[in-house]
Image (cartoon, rainbow, N blue to C red):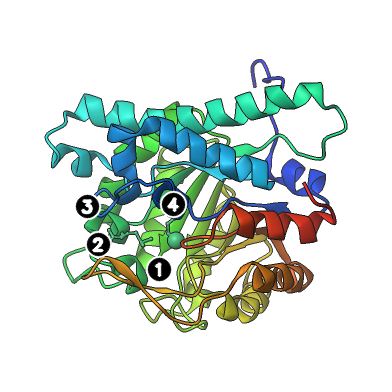
Amino acid sequence: MGLKKAFTSSLEDVIEKAGGCAVVDGGFATQLERHGAAINDPLWSAVCLIKQPDLIKRVHLDYLEAGADILITSSYQATIPGFLSRGLSIEQGELLLKKSVKLAVEARNSFWDALKVTPDHRYNRALVAASIGSYGAYLADGSEYSGCYGPRVDVDKLKDFHRRRLQVLVEAGPDLLAFETIPNKLEAQACVELLEEQNVQIPSWICFSSVDGENAPSGEGFKECLEVINKSNKIHAVGINCTPPHLIQSLICKFKELTSKAIIVYPNSGEIWDGKAKRWLPAKCFDDENFECFATIWRDSGAKLIGGCCRTTPSTVQAISKVLKGQSQ
Ligand SMILES: C[S+](C)CC[C@H](N)C(=O)O
Ligand SMILES: N[C@@H](CCS)C(=O)O
Ligand SMILES: [Zn+2]
């Protein structure tokens, strides 16, 4: 095992310290945009790794102040092929991936250190989860919400896509790995196989998107999607992200039947991403009050990790934290 870091803490510890249900942060890209970042770009929020790293740290601090127990890094759409197509070298791309973890760790550490002068604070020391967006996120065509990767994409292609980024992110030393917005069974299988192949020791979660509240976006049932995940001891939590809030409760109930792993949910605001126009289409939008009410229901239905995804903000996370921890921070 070697020397244990003074702060080594598992996902399970954080859930326990948070009182049984930990708070994940909220829409990362959304908060970047609220600070003025322009992310209409094939790299989406990851463009700020190149242009505005200080803003990334600011967003992480916003979510820590709001009460997040877990920060998700800025690497959702950061990939080596994506950086190469911007004219950067492999080495520069790898440095940017490492920087995504470093920025979140620095934000977490400085926030935690600053709390030393107020010993009666109610914050937990947050964990940093390195975001690994789906292949569909990299394609930047909205296919993380359709699961349609075409007939030429097989499990080996997906593993090849994910391999180097995974290795670099693991080397950067996050507390967790967050596979996000996975739209089909094939990609879940690729992620699980890679974690085994690389013998990754950092605990992971895998989150699917869903558009109908029943199945993965590909149309595959979650029963078959979860089969491969359930067999892996590298995956510590499984759930749903970037999906409208009104679909979440029944998905939690479904997942409860299908897995004994911790269930994680971090829905979006209910708006729908138009992958072609690259904008959010107004739909039934859920505000912080809805989230406060939903979060209690989701916790009571069995979720152990709750947060927000796209178009949610620090005030959403503050509302979730307040209701789950019975306090105002
Ligand atoms: C989570 S979606 C809104 C991220 C952006 C998408 N992959 C795109 O580039 O169109
Ligand atoms: N972690 C990403 C998820 C996009 S679906 C973000 O919050 O920007
Ligand atoms: Zn999202």
Left or right: 248, with 159 as reference point: right
Which is more toward the observer, 153 or 271?
Answer: 271
Of the two numbered discs 1 and 4 in the rendering, the one whose residue sits closer to the viewer: 4
Of the two numbered discs 2 and 3 in the rendering, the one whose residue sits closer to the viewer: 3
**Which quarter of the image is occupied by the N terminus?**
top right
Q: Are marks 2 and 4 in contact (CB under 8 Å)?
A: no
Position above or below: 318 against 115: below
Q: Is residue 68 visible?
A: no
Label 1 residue SS: helix
Number of other residues with Cα within 10 Å of mark 3, as a class: few under 14, some 14 to 19, many 20 or more: many
Could you give the CA–CA distance between mark 2 and mark 3, rounded to whole angstroms? Answer: 23 Å
The location of residue 16, given as percent across then percent down, is 80, 47
Of the two numbered discs 2 and 4 in the rendering, the one whose residue sits closer to the viewer: 4
- 2 or 3: tag closer to the N-terminus: 3
The location of residue 44, given as percent across then percent down, is 30, 51
Could you give the CA–CA distance between mark 4 and mark 3, rounded to whole angstroms? Answer: 19 Å
Label 2 residue SS: loop
Number of other residues with Cα within 10 Å of mark 4, as a class: few under 14, some 14 to 19, many 20 or more: few
Reading the image, the residue beneath label 2 is 154
Q: Residue at x 40, y 78 (%)?
A: 282
Reading the image, the residue beneath label 3 is 42
Could you give the CA–CA distance between mark 1 and mark 2, rounded to whole angstroms? Answer: 11 Å
Q: Are marks 2 and 3 in contact (CB under 8 Å)?
A: no
Could you give the CA–CA distance between mark 3 and mark 1, rounded to whole angstroms? Answer: 25 Å
Label 3 residue SS: loop
Q: Which amino acid lies under the numbered mark 1 shown in the image of this protein?
A: Lys
- 2 or 4: tag closer to the N-terminus: 4
Q: Is mark 3 within 8 Å of ligand 1?
A: yes
- 1 or 2: tag closer to the N-terminus: 2
Reading the image, the residue beneath label 4 is 34
The location of residue 158, given as percent across then percent down, is 28, 54
Q: Which amino acid lies under the numbered mark 4 shown in the image of this protein?
A: Arg
